[in-house]
Amino acid sequence: MKRLFALSLVTAFVMAAPAGPAFAQGLSLIRDSEIENTIRTLAEPVFAAAGLNTDSVEVHLVNDPSLNAFVAGGQKIFINTGMILKADHPGQVRGVIAHEAGHIAGGHLTRAQEAMRNATAQSIVAMVLGAAAVMAAGGDAGVGGAAVLGGASVGQRSILQYSRIQESAADQAAIRYLEASGQSGRGLVEILQKLGNQNALLPSSQDVYARSHPLSQDRVTALRRDVEASRFAAVPDTAEEVAAFERMKAKLQGYLGRYTVTLRLYPESDSSIPGHYARAFAYHHRPDVRRALAETVVLLERLPDDPYFNELRGQILFENGRVREAVPPYERAVLLAPEEPLLRIGLARAQIALNDPVRNKEAIENLEHAVRIDRTIISAWHQLAIAYGRDKQFGMSSLASAERAFLSGRSDEARGHAARAEAALPVGSPGALRAQDILNASRQGGKTRNRRSR
């Protein structure tokens, strides 16, 4: 998956704050290596069956409690946290992904895509929020219209809303993809049943999915009939899928949910791994450091080689000022999953905080490794700017700040940093060339070329 912006809320969950109205309403994108890998594992067989390049399809997690998923900006699928938290098993999430893959493969919303093709995922979330506001207002372009591309040519309904014919086509495509990959389509039927009562509500009270994906009993009946005719209708989720799904739900609930609700769903009597996982996050945010760390002890006793349990322990220690103690579990996490850039960013943040020149150089190595894997994680560039500055690499520090500003949509700031970087770096060097790319792109409002500067 393509990586996005990281605010320093917690290391395990990196929030990507979109510009514009979405930010004002607290909508954001969530980055988490474990959750991304879980969703990717569910999605890849579907994408392959759909004939989609699995490396080209981006799946983004939106921090929103409503039951929703949508396609926008080419091959970008957005799934709300509410969709995952309200799902009962992984097959339901897979069914939604298969349906959205049907929209991509079917070329739906193509008229809207040209203006959005190069938009960042953060910008698309802001656009869609504006489109949803218009739809909730009954399609009045005067309400929320400014939130939809700021007056550009994409209409509010074309961003988010499908026709009944397209919905039926996406349903049929989803069944074909699930059949081809030997998986059951019952999860998709179950999700639609969850939405069955939405049509009876006022538009302002409906989940966005019910408004943007026309739903009828005939559609559900037809889909159920086709699913039950499949020879894979009764194929269950694998034990590995269920375990990963339950961990994902526990993590989201512990991080995003209310403390009292989390403890009701995962009481102290729950000795399962998801139970300990959810409570560790809940206690950490209360904050109750002693209990949070105690939960990580149990988790690591059971699975000492789990990178995400090590990451969580490092995170709790770091965010409670115990920086030196946080480094070993972060290092362990990176050792266990060396190609996960978010883990390296967490470790680098702790190394920088030690304010030691040797550790600072190690942080630079980790951050450079992270951005080689994924250039779009804004927090990596922020930390690199700090680390380069402390290492007296001022030109590279300015370049990292330019990358951060450009990815955040702050073109004027990006130009200023890029100009300083170009002036400080050797003429013709990879860094100077990259600074020129950012200068040109920030003037034109387009994308930069992906030069291999490091």
Image: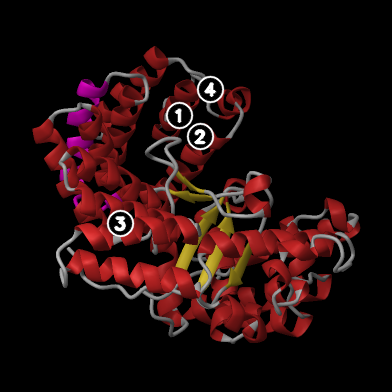
The stretch in magenta equals: 323-341
- Point out the tag, 3 or 1, that comes first from the N-terminus: 1
- Point out the tag, 1 or 4, that comes first from the N-terminus: 4
Image depth: mark 4 or mark 2 in front = 2
Label 4 to label 3: alpha-carbon separation: 54 Å
Q: Mark 3 sits on what residue? A: 420
Q: Mark 1 sits on what residue? A: 281
User: What SS does tag 4 mark?
Assistant: loop
- Do callouts 3 and 2 mark residues in contact (Cβ within 8 Å)? no
Q: Mark 2 sits on what residue? A: 255
Around disc 3, counting alpha carbons within 10 Å, would you say few (fewer than 14), some (14 to 19), or many (20 or more)?
some
**Relative to 185, 323 lies left or right:** left
Of the pair 440 and 10, the residue shown nearer to us? 440
Label 4 to label 2: alpha-carbon separation: 15 Å
User: What SS does tag 2 mark?
Assistant: helix
Amino acid, disc 1: Phe
Label 3 to label 1: alpha-carbon separation: 41 Å
Going 29% across and 39% down the picture, which residue do you hit? 346
